[in-house]
Image (cartoon, rainbow, N blue to C red):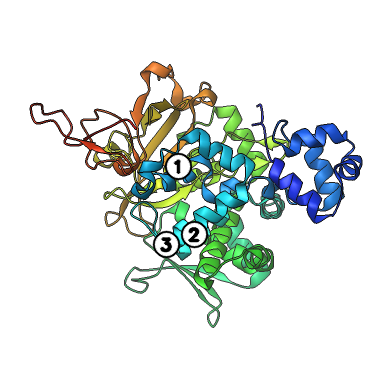
């Protein structure tokens, strides 16, 4: 699979200046010519894998910092902010935004930070959940050290146990002197899992499904055996509020649990062998659709990458309670609002059925390459019949031809269903489903004609 070209000239230039090196001296340490380094710094050449490895070796450099734009959501994140009506008269187009990101990413990040802190109709002030999500996406939801540790433990447990639930229970008993007890709902009316150290028990609610029980046991094991590794990552993050750090640590714990249930190497081999067949993978690993969705967004091990899936979880009001972009380029899901033309909403009326749809983002007349999306209802943990969500998985259509769920689906560009990132951010003309006018566009009114949409607007 071809890697996306990485243009990161400003970051490389800042690194060189931080080290107080001339271009010639820095080029010598990177084993490239000064002219080639000059082209890299001016964003006329991408940073190759070999140059990146030399940056890491010579300067103890964190490769993630080569993508400063990801912290603000890339070009789509910047476009959402410039769509504010206060900037409508400036006529700033995407080409100018792209130039700003490429030439001065730190300046773009400063603008985004100032804009977000001020708040607007389009972007809410920062909160613990947003801060935690931003840190997850800074890592692209892949934590290599946790994955390796979980895989080693899973391999160790499989040496003597074939069933992961039995293996987890035995591990808790043998290593931590904890028994597992399933208690009636009336005893645990408001809890799914409880650690009772006095009784030396891990107590689980009877309302949990088998997949959820295993997941809760894996979480408990992760807390007991990998708390230091999880805390090291969480404490290294720069959060303004402790609540954000706690949310991030909770995500890392859940990540570790999923890695135990679906060990990286074995899981990726199963994905590739089945064409990422979602029902087959659920049953093979004994996990829920939502747990499977989480795991599919994490497959980014160097030299052993899976397809770059994104995942969102939506409630009936259209609110996004979970958003994982992973290594995908699906920045449109960051808006926190969805399009009613997306079959994700239809899934609520067809509980348990997998809704497969080929969609393309249609905004300001520009169509992306399209996405194959797969949506299905899930129930809240321990609350069957009381809480319902839809989990949506998506992958770029260009990568989806061999997927099991793509069979019988046309992936021709003309057959894609155009969707937008919520009406307020969508500039699609003549959409009969439109509920709100787009931010940053001038409304147009015609005294003698009534269009199919209540909000007509100019194209610029």
Q: Residue 337's x, y, as percent? A: 34, 46
Q: Quadrant of the C terminus?
A: top left
Q: Residue 205's x, y, as percent? A: 40, 65
Q: Are marks 2 and 3 in contact (CB under 8 Å)?
A: yes
> Is residue 140 shown to the viewer in this render?
no
Q: Nearer the viewer, residue 72 or 23?
A: 23
Q: Which residue is mark 3?
A: 118
Q: Which residue is mark 1?
A: 79
Farthest residue, direction front: 89
Q: Nearer the viewer, residue 190 or 66?
A: 66
Q: Nearer the viewer, residue 166 or 266?
A: 266
Give the vertical position of 313 relative to 452 (above or below): below
Give the vertical position of 423 relative to 177 (above or below): above
- The residue sitting at 42% across, 18% down in the picture is 413
- The residue sitting at 51% across, 66% down in the picture is 244
- The residue sitting at 42% across, 26% down in the picture is 367
- Mark 2 secondary-structure assignment: helix
- The residue sitting at 53% across, 31% down in the picture is 276
Q: Is residue 398 left or right of residue 318?
A: right
Q: CA distance from mark 1 to mark 3?
A: 17 Å
Q: Which residue is mark 2?
A: 114
Nearest to N terminus: mark 2 or mark 1? 1
Q: Residue 392's x, y, as percent? A: 41, 40
Give the vertical position of 316 relative to 450 (above or below): below
């Amino acid at each position: 699979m071809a890697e996306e070209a990485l243009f990161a000239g400003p970051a490389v230039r800042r690194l060189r200046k931080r080290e107080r090196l001339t271009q010639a001296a820095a080029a010598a340490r990177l084993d490239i010519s000064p002219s080639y380094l000059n082209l890299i710094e001016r964003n006329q050449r991408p940073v190759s894998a070999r140059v990146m490895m030399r940056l890491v070796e010579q300067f103890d450099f964190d490769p993630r910092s080569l993508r400063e734009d990801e912290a603000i959501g890339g070009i789509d994140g910047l476009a959402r902010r410039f769509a504010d009506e206060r900037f409508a008269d400036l006529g700033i187009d995407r080409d100018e935004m792209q130039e700003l990101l490429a030439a001065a990413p730190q300046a773009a990040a400063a603008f985004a930070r100032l804009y977000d802190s001020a708040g607007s109709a389009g972007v809410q002030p920062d909160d613990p959940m947003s801060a935690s999500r931003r840190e997850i996406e800074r890592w692209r939801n892949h934590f290599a050290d946790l994955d390796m540790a979980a895989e080693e433990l899973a391999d160790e447990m499989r040496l003597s146990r074939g069933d992961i639930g039995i293996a987890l229970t035995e591990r808790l008993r043998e290593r931590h002197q904890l028994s597992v007890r399933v208690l009636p709902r009336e005893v645990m009316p408001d809890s799914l899992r409880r650690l009772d150290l006095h009784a030396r028990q891990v107590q689980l609610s009877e309302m949990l499904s088998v997949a959820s029980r295993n997941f809760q046991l894996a979480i408990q094991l992760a807390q007991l055996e990998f708390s230091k590794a999880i805390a090291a990552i969480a404490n290294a993050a720069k959060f303004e509020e402790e609540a954000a750090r706690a949310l991030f640590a909770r995500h890392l714990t859940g990540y570790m649990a999923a890695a135990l249930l679906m060990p990286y190497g074995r899981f990726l081999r199963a994905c590739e062998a089945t064409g990422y067949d979602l029902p087959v993978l659920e049953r093979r690993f004994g996990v829920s659709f939502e747990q499977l969705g989480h795991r599919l967004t994490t497959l980014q091990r160097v030299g052993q990458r899976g397809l770059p899936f994104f995942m969102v979880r939506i409630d009936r009001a259209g609110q996004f309670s979970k958003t994982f972009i992973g290594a995908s380029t699906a920045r449109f899901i960051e808006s926190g609002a969805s399009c009613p033309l997306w079959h994700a909403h239809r899934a609520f009326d067809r509980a348990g059925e997998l809704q497969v749809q080929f969609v393309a983002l249609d905004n300001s007349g520009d169509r992306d390459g399209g996405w194959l999306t797969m949506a299905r209802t899930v129930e809240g943990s321990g609350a069957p019949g009381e809480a319902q969500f839809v989990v949506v998985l998506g992958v770029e259509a260009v990568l989806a031809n061999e997927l099991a769920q793509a069979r019988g689906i046309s992936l021709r560009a003309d057959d894609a269903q155009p969707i937008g990132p919520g009406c307020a951010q969508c500039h699609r003309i003549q959409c009969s489903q439109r509920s709100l006018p787009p931010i940053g566009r001038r409304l147009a009114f015609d005294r003698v004609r009534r269009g199919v949409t209540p909000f007509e607007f100019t194209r610029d």
